[in-house]
Image: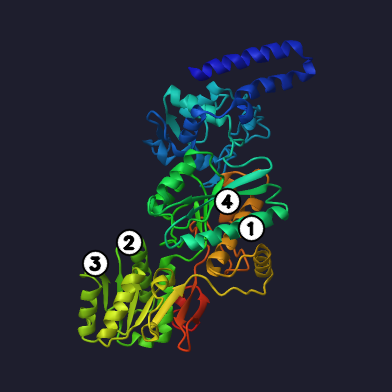
Amino acid sequence: MKYENCSRSIKKLADRLTTALPVRLLAVALLVGVLVGLVSDPAVAGWGEQEQRGKSVYKQGRATGEVKALLAGPGLEVDAAQFPCVNCHGHDGAGVIEGGVTTADIRPSRLAFVADATRDFGRQRPAYDNEALARAIRYGLDAGGNSLHPAMPRYRINDDDMADLLAYMLHLGQEPVAGVEEESVRVAALLPSAGPLAAPAREVERVLAAFEEYTNEQGGAYGRRLLLEFKQYDPAVDAGGVAAVDELLAGERPFCLLSSMGLGAAALATLEQAGVPLIAPLAVPASDGYGAARNTFFVFTSVADQARVLVDHLVAELPGLGGGAVLLHDAGPEGLAGKLGVESQLSVYDQPLLASLQLAAAGGVEAVVAQLAAAGPAGQRPSAVFFFADGERAVEFLRLAAAEDWHPLLLGPAERLSPSLAGLPPALLAGLRLVSPAGVPDLDAGRSREFLAVMEREGIAGRYRAFQLSAWAGGLLLREGLVRSGRRLTTPRFMAALTGLHGFDTGLLPPLSFDKNSRVGLAGASVLQFSTAGPGLLVARSWREPLAAFAAVDPQL
């Protein structure tokens, strides 16, 4: 077997060392012999295809051959992908507390030591070599022949895949990290070069470049210079940025990405599969539950929670909902998330919808307006319409409803609706209520003044200010994660640092909080309406989180 050759080499080296050294250094010589087999410097030993295959076994339970995990307790054999090594031993092999059991530290430096019964869990064993480690993985026996804890699965794995796994385990705790050098960390930003987002994307690039320069002037992130790499893609040619992401991952990978303007679900899924962290201050997720992307950290409130804020506002503005409310949505992820948020929050108030219609299935906007304006599902015209579809269809709805002399409140997400509203007469805009996840920043606060000072210094005007503020806030989130990760920067440490943020104040947005179940920093939103005195938006409801069930008795809270 491959690891037997390594074991024989270790023994020969140990023999040569022990004959040449004094007795008092014998223990050190033996330790060096074991470390040759179990401790490896990636810069010396290299990082190749075998280590990459072994990483897949360790972190995903996937190998070139079949790998099965035997659960000693229930006596079940399952796919190893359900119980990969990383789940219990952690990304760096240092061990974790899992189900009340403290799992073993399996880093090479730890396995190279002889365990003493007086201090090492009451167990005595010699140091591991590769053969002993393979036996532990397959049969649950340590280097001294003692049975390991029954909570550890025993794995059925062929010799080639075992050799790959052991090769990777040499690097546990010292695996090379893409984009991270001793003095710098590389971060990429993918931005559209054409289409409706091209102009704000150019402003975002200028702001992020200014943030990079300002951060490095302040000493960088824990002593490392921040190196931002901007890459453009044309949405007309590369819809959703899929090819741009593939090209990015095929080349010299960055440590993480900052911004995700225009990236579609397929591109985000590719980044997720590759395990590349993404800080997304310019995108709005559909939902924020556990099933959402684990490597992507969104800043802004999910569509579902924005919908819940809209319900809270409507209940306050239109007690009893007047003639009732209907929900119109499309079949996309955002439309379905809006539907979920509206329906779940209305149930808190025990208020049903008159109707919930998927626009295409109901025959389109024209057919829906004709049906609702005639009498509505309950024999009267609805007083309010929740609208979770694109802005063009919202404009069509407003024009057709006005032609029927029907003027309901129309409530929907500002991100989707506002770009299409320019040029509409004030009469059509009067009944609009737009929900926005961004609060009104306090421009006199410390970090706001810092942002404005840099913008002035760099000659960056206030056009697309919302994009600029969001991009700068994303940069601050990135820097905080890097600083909290310390000098030993790895992807798991960075992810843990961000996940542990609670009430992080950017000075430009409401405080951000993440946890293991949510990768969305904000949970609230504000509601805006158009001014009757002239162009512009007014705050109809200040930024706040959706009301929980216990608070729903008083929507003014």
Relative placement, left or right, of 243 versus 103 is left
Q: Real-space Cα distance between discs 3 and 1? A: 44 Å
Q: Secondary structure at mark 4?
A: helix
Q: Real-space Cα distance between discs 1 and 2? A: 35 Å
Q: Real-space Cα distance between discs 2 and 3? A: 11 Å
Kindly report which numbered mark, 4 or 2, lies closer to the viewer in this rendering: 2
Neighbor class of circle 4 (other Cα within 10 Å; few <14, some 14-19, many 20+) is some
Q: Secondary structure at mark 1?
A: helix
Q: Real-space Cα distance between discs 4 and 3? A: 42 Å
Between 227 and 384, the one nearer to me in the picture: 227
Which mark, residue 496? 4
Kindly report which numbered mark, 1 or 2, lies closer to the viewer in this rendering: 1
The reply to whether the C-beta atoms of the residues labelled 4 and 2 are less than 8 Å apart is no
Q: Amino acid at mark 3?
A: Ala
Which mark, residue 332? 2
Q: Secondary structure at mark 3?
A: loop
The reply to whether the C-beta atoms of the residues labelled 1 and 2 are less than 8 Å apart is no
Q: Amino acid at mark 2?
A: Gly
Q: Which residue is mark 1?
A: 211
Kindly report which numbered mark, 4 or 3, lies closer to the viewer in this rendering: 3
Measured as percent of width and height from the top left, residue 106 is found at 58, 34
- The reply to whether residue 159 is in sight is yes
Neighbor class of circle 1 (other Cα within 10 Å; few <14, some 14-19, many 20+) is many
The reply to whether the C-beta atoms of the residues labelled 1 and 4 are less than 8 Å apart is no
Between 417 and 151, the one nearer to me in the picture: 417
Q: Secondary structure at mark 2?
A: loop
Quadrant of the image occupied by residue 125: top right
Mark 3 or mark 1: name the one nearer the start of the chain.
1
Q: Amino acid at mark 1?
A: Phe
- The reply to whether residue 41 is in sight is no
